[in-house]
Amino acid sequence: MTLLLALITGLFYAAGIYLILRRSLVKVIFGLMFLGHAANMLIFSTGRLTKGAPAFVPKGAQALVEPFADPLPQALILTAIVIGFGLQAFAIVLFRRSFEELGTDDIDAMRSTDRIEQVGGGDA
């Protein structure tokens, strides 16, 4: 199971880096999503994988008994998911605004912000 998670994490990182190096902003956004999922999978796989063992103290016990699930990676992943959604929402809004102003999603065509004044009539 750990090997499978490592392979999936590697695939997410490879796909994310490949997409983030593309010229299209849509592909960059998908690359950011893949990198976020890869980071979550990495945190998940570095935590101890215990199937069917919750992170609860059994009734009558004073402490956790092995095996138990570590709640720290789960809390980190939940935080990372929220931050990832915020980043993706910002990137999508930024993409939409730049596409409305420039009419293209090609990053190389967006080299200068001077073009925004020419296209938008100088109100920006």
Image (cartoon, rainbow, N blue to C red):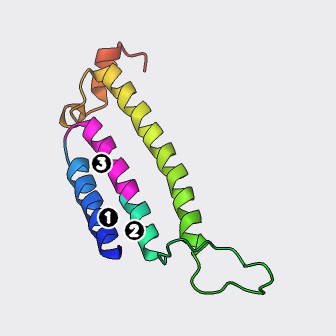
- 3 or 1: tag closer to the N-terminus: 1
Image vertical order of residue 74 relative to residue 64, above or below: above
The residue singled out by tag 2 in the image is: 42
The residue shown at (27%, 24%) is 115
* Spatial separation of the CA atoms under disc 2 and disc 1: 6 Å
The residue shown at (20%, 53%) is 18
Rendering quarter of residue 75: bottom right
Main secondary structure found in the magenta portion? helix
> At numbered mark 3, what does the secondary structure look like: helix, strand or loop?
helix
Which of these two is toward me, 111 or 61? 61
Which of these two is toward me, 47 or 69? 69
The residue shown at (56%, 57%) is 78
The residue singled out by tag 1 in the image is: 9
Q: Which residues are magenta?
A: 23-37
- 2 or 3: tag closer to the N-terminus: 3
Q: Quadrant of the C terminus?
A: top left
Give the residue type that dot 3 points to.
Gly
Give the residue type that dot 1 points to.
Thr
The residue singled out by tag 3 in the image is: 31
Asked if marks 2 and 1 touch (Cβ < 8 Å), the reply is: yes
For label 2, count other residues whose C-alpha is less than 10 Å away and answer few (under 14), some (14-19) or many (20+): some
Which of these two is toward me, 53 or 95? 53
For label 3, count other residues whose C-alpha is less than 10 Å away and answer few (under 14), some (14-19) or many (20+): many
Query: Residue 38's x, y, as percent?
Result: 36, 60
Query: Residue 53's x, y, as percent?
Result: 58, 74
